[in-house]
Image (cartoon, rainbow, N blue to C red):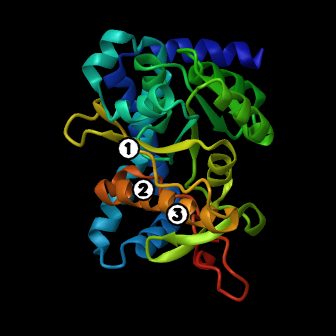
Amino acid sequence: MKERLARILLRLLEAVPLAWLAVFCEGVMSLVWAIDRKHRRIARINLRIAFPEMGEEEVRRIIRRCYQRMGTSAAEFIHIPKMDDRYIREHFRVEGAEHVRESLDRRGLPAMAMTGHFGNWELLSHVFGSVIAPAAFIVRPLKSPILDRIVTERREWVGNTVIRKEDSAKEVMKVLRRNTLVGILIDQNVDRHKGILVDFFTRKAYTTFGIARLAMAMRAAVHPAFIFRDPSRKFHHVVRFGPPVAIDYDAPREEEVPRVTRRCNEELEKAIREAPDQWMWFHRRWKTRPEGEPDLYKEAH
């Protein structure tokens, strides 16, 4: 019954024109911004770490814009079934797809796309699957099974494949062997046993080593992939793929994995510096610290 009601509500929201739905969702997120003191503090701490020179007024502007754009992205995600070929041609520009094709088709390499919670990242895979070829990407299942099923349907709308995080390694290797691009988000904090400490802005951050290990094991290319929202036309985007990060597949793994992980963070940092109001600043990215270092988010608890 709950799922049926959720699907009816979703169909009603789909029927609302995107511009109107975005106004509603942005309004909701503006209210969240007003009352969500905890995540405003986390975002402020993160921005101070990343951009210590930034003025307080700019910090506040970026944080508020992040909340609003979460509303815009939610409206776009609801409207995915209406994003036909014509809509995609008119609202998205894809740059650098030839880099991925070079890896997959000409060089015959497995290929991964490294990205983060940047822009409307849900549309990144949707556009790639629509314009180039179906892709696969790793996700963390939602706590609500009903929401998880509904969101997964949206994510797989154009033939893409969702890979659950808990059984990702073996499944990713299977997909890579089928010459399918696999997308992996690398911008979340991880525990010490799941990552390594590498540079990210002005501090080191524990970062997943999974993508580097997979690349070394599969001799796979790793391409930066980001979706930038046009600041003057909010429903228009640029999807940008870069050339593969440098990897020495024959180097000792214990030396090359940290180097590749650091290079991935450098690509993420470049995208964030280009459009700082398009990254999701509310996550405790620098939460895990080396032994003896203080908690950077203590005041946000």
In the rendering, which numbered label is found on residue 242? 1
Q: Amino acid at mark 1?
A: Gly
Q: Position of residue 236 (x, y in %)?
A: 28, 30
Disc number for residue 286: none
Which residue does the image show at 51% across and 13% down from the upper left? 12
Q: Residue furthest front?
A: 250
Residue 43 at x, y percent in the picture: 47, 64
Nearest-to-viewer mark from 2 and 3? 2
x and y, in percent, of residue 214 in the image? 67, 47
Secondary structure found at label 3:
helix
Which numbered marker is on residue 37? Answer: 3
Decide which of tag 1 and tag 2 comes sooner along the chain. 1
* Residue 25 makes an appearance in the image: no
Q: Quadrant of the N terminus?
A: top right
Q: Is residue 182 left or right of residue 96?
A: right
Relative horizontal placement of residue 23, taking residue 164 as reference (left or right): left
Contact flag, marks 1 and 2 (Cβ < 8 Å): yes
Residue 275 shown left or right of residue 287 in the figure? left
In the image, residue 18 lies at what x, y percent? 36, 21
Query: Which residue bears the numbered disc 2?
Result: 267
